[in-house]
Image (tube, helix red, strand yellow):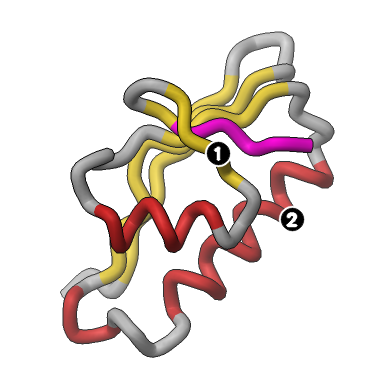
């Protein structure tokens, strides 16, 4: 059983990071696993000095929207971008 999964992509000049999925198995949701994972992702982003960070997710999921907003992401059509 997979507990969590994340997909990151970066371009060759390392200026842009794209987060495609942050997935936590339903059995482990609401236990801080997603928050722990996002904090590690944000550390990685900060360490690698990305100029742009984009997140792709289901924009119809209000719970996910609120989750990502608490980490500083803002909504733009069909994506969220980390506001610096």
Q: In this orientation, which residue lies closer to the viewer: 10 or 20?
A: 20
Q: Is residue 7 left or right of residue 38?
A: left
Q: Secondary structure at mark 1?
A: strand
Mark 2 vs 1, N-terminal side: 2
Residue depicted at x 28% and y 55%: 62
Magenta region, residue range: 80-84
- Crowding at dot 2, Cα within 10 Å, few <14 / some 14-19 / many 20+, comes out as few
- Image: 48 above or below 3: above
Q: Which numbered circle lies on residue 43? A: 2
Residue 17 occupies which quadrant of the picture? top right
Residue depicted at x 42% and y 59%: 66
* Secondary structure that dominates the magenta span: strand
Q: Which residue is mark 1?
A: 74
Residue depicted at x 68% and y 23%: 52
The quadrant of the rendering that contains the N terminus is: bottom left
Mark 2 vs mark 1: give the one in front.
1
Q: Gap between marks 2 and 1, in whole Å?
A: 18 Å
């Amino acid at each position: 059983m997979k507990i969590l999964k994340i997909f990151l992509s970066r371009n060759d000049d390392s200026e842009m990071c794209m987060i495609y999925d942050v997935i936590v198995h339903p059995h482990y949701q609401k236990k801080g696993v997603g928050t722990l994972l996002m904090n590690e992702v944000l550390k990685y982003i900060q360490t690698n000095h990305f100029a742009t960070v984009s997140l792709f997710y289901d924009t119809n999921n209000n719970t996910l929207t609120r989750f990502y907003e608490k980490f500083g992401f803002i909504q733009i059509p069909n994506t969220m971008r980390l506001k610096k």
